[in-house]
Amino acid sequence: MWSSARHAVAVLAVCSGLAAATWPGGIGLRAQQAADETIGSAGPMRSVPLLLTDEERHRVYQGLMRFPDVASKDALDLADKVPGSAPLQDLPANVTADIPLVRGHKFMKLEDRILLVEPASRVVVAMIPRYKLLP
């Protein structure tokens, strides 16, 4: 009986962790990564949106403003898949050094927003508006 109770608690913990990681305003990818380390998952969920703080979003914004815009006919939004024909760029080293959460991701800078993309799936995991963010 004790092992079935522990199993139920473990299932509940995993399910609530996944729900919180995908829920807007939830605890996000950092908590998912911690849960993966705890339960021995094969790896973090890559299609989960990156929940960046306002300060992190501002640092990404500042680090990418010198790059040229890319023209896109597609109206891309969070969790959309970027077409294979759309060019993605590597994030600069200073951005990934300041914000380790974005390491391994690519970006696409449009005229009105910056998209952070998970390169293997080409899914948009974060979107940063191009207007000036408060520090």
Image (spheres, grey):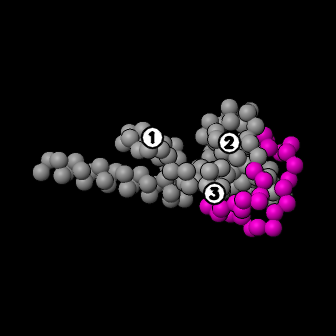
Q: Residue placed at 66% from the left, 45% from the top?
A: 105
Q: Are marks 1 and 2 in contact (CB under 8 Å)?
A: no
| Residue 51 locus on image (x, y percent) | 59, 49
Q: Distance from label 2 to label 3 (Cα)?
A: 23 Å
| Front: mark 1 or 2 | 1
Q: Which residue is mark 2?
A: 55
Q: Quadrant of residue 16?
A: bottom left
* Mark 3 / mark 1, whichever is N-terminal: 1
Q: Residue placed at 27% from the left, 51% from the top?
A: 9
Q: Residue placed at 50% from the left, 59% from the top?
A: 23
Q: Residue placed at 85% from the left, 53% from the top?
A: 69
Toward the front, the furthest residue is 84
Residue 54 in view:
no
* Start-end of magenta stretch: 62-88
| Front: mark 2 or 3 | 3
Q: Which secondary structure, mark 3?
A: strand
| Residue 107 locus on image (x, y percent) | 73, 49
Q: Which residue is mark 3?
A: 123
Q: Camera-side residue: 52 or 94? A: 94
Q: Quadrant of residue 125?
A: bottom right
Q: Amino acid at mark 2?
A: Glu
* Mark 1 / mark 2, whichever is N-terminal: 1
Toward the left, the furthest residue is 1
Q: Amino acid at mark 3?
A: Val
Q: Camera-side residue: 51 or 78? A: 78
Q: Which secondary structure, mark 2?
A: helix
Q: Amino acid at mark 1?
A: Ala
Q: Which residue is mark 1?
A: 34
